[in-house]
Image (spheres, rainbow, N blue to C red):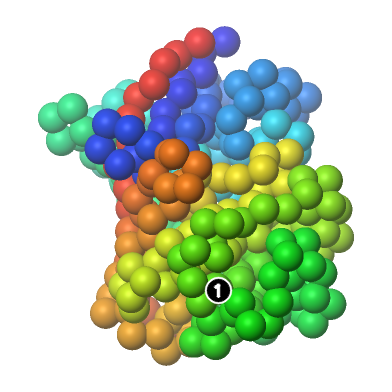
Amino acid sequence: MNVLRIAAFSDGASGGNPAGVHIAAALPDVAMMQRIAAEVGFSETAFAAPLGDAWRVRYFSPQSEVPFCGHATIALGAALALQQGDGEFALQLNQATIRVHGRRDGDTIAATLQSPPTHSRAADAALLHDALALFGLNAGDLDPQLPPAQIHAGADHLLVALRSRERLSAMHYALEQGRSLMRQFGLITIALVHAESPRLLHARNAFASGGVYEDPATGAAAAALGGYLRDLGWPHGGSVDIVQGEDMGMRSLLQVHIDGVAGAPVQVSGTARLMTAA
């Protein structure tokens, strides 16, 4: 079965978050998609099939289905551009309809996704208490400019902003304990971030809910973060750059374009590099 392996949000010829992409005339059954995702072994694999003028898309981690995955959407946009030519593609997800624009520029493939609607709220006190304990953090480590929040753009994430880049670099936690906490509160990832400046943020995303210790690039969390920054009144100037995966040796670059009113979708862009097919 042909599965493209594409690193999304790459930094030139390196970095990025690998995703599997399977495009066929019809989606395999759920058990088969789950098995393929486990065999591919990346944090997510996107499965796509034509549906009228759109594409029906589902995402699977090695252990479970997820409602939306940003980096796999960027990878899918790149794959569709290679297969169908440059263009904008409508994607029908389980719970939303979004769009991705894929384009080729010489040897470079790039894509921009439009996220599902966004929303955010202050973090639940019990969740925040347990999350700080999980990562060995305390209230003094937090950046008061970016209060902890539960953020959403097609999937739920906990956002915890840290005062120092060094504290972010030292991120560690117990995988099984993290998985239990994320599943208890319905989270896809816990995003730890540090704002170097209003328009440059560093991020690390724990993805224990999907059986992955850390994601090198998380487009869904980046979109949710963009919506949160807009709701907060952050001086983003229309876009922010997010550097992720650097502490893993897989530096990834994500650009979030922020406009519109509270709750509106945001756009996330990045380049992609084709790895192998199997």
Q: Residue at x 80, y 76 (%)?
A: 129
Residue 166 higher or lower than 27, as above or below: below
Q: Quadrant of residue 274?
A: top left
User: Is 195 on the left-hand or right-hand side of 62?
Assistant: left
Please report the residue visible at 74 percent of the width from the left and 70 percent of the height from the top.
Answer: 132
State the residue lying farthest toward the left.
106
**Is residue 251 found left or right of 156 in the rendered image?**
left
Q: Is residue 1 visible?
A: yes
Where residue 85 sits in the image (x, y, percent)? 25, 30
In this rendering, position of residue 276 left or right of residue 69: left
Relative to the observer, which residue lies in front, 104 or 209? 209
Q: Quadrant of residue 79?
A: top left
> In front here: 155 or 237?
237
Please tell me whether residue 2 is drawn above or below residue 134 in the rendered image: above
Residue at position x 39%, y 44% in the image: 251
Measuring from the top left, give residue 238's x and y in whole percent: 28, 75
Rendering coords of residue 146 (x, y %): 52, 82
Residue that numbered label 1 is attached to: 161
Which quarter of the rendering shows the N terminus?
Answer: top right
Q: How many marks?
A: 1
Viewer can see residue 121: no
| Mark 1 Cα shell of 10 Å, populated few (<14), some (14-19), many (≥20) | many
- Secondary structure beneath label 1: strand
Q: Amino acid at mark 1?
A: Ala
118 over 65 or under it: above or below:
below
Residue in the picture at 55% in, 73% down: 161
For this view, does 189 lie left or right of residue 169? right
Question: In the image, residue 194 lies at what x, y percent?
Answer: 47, 69
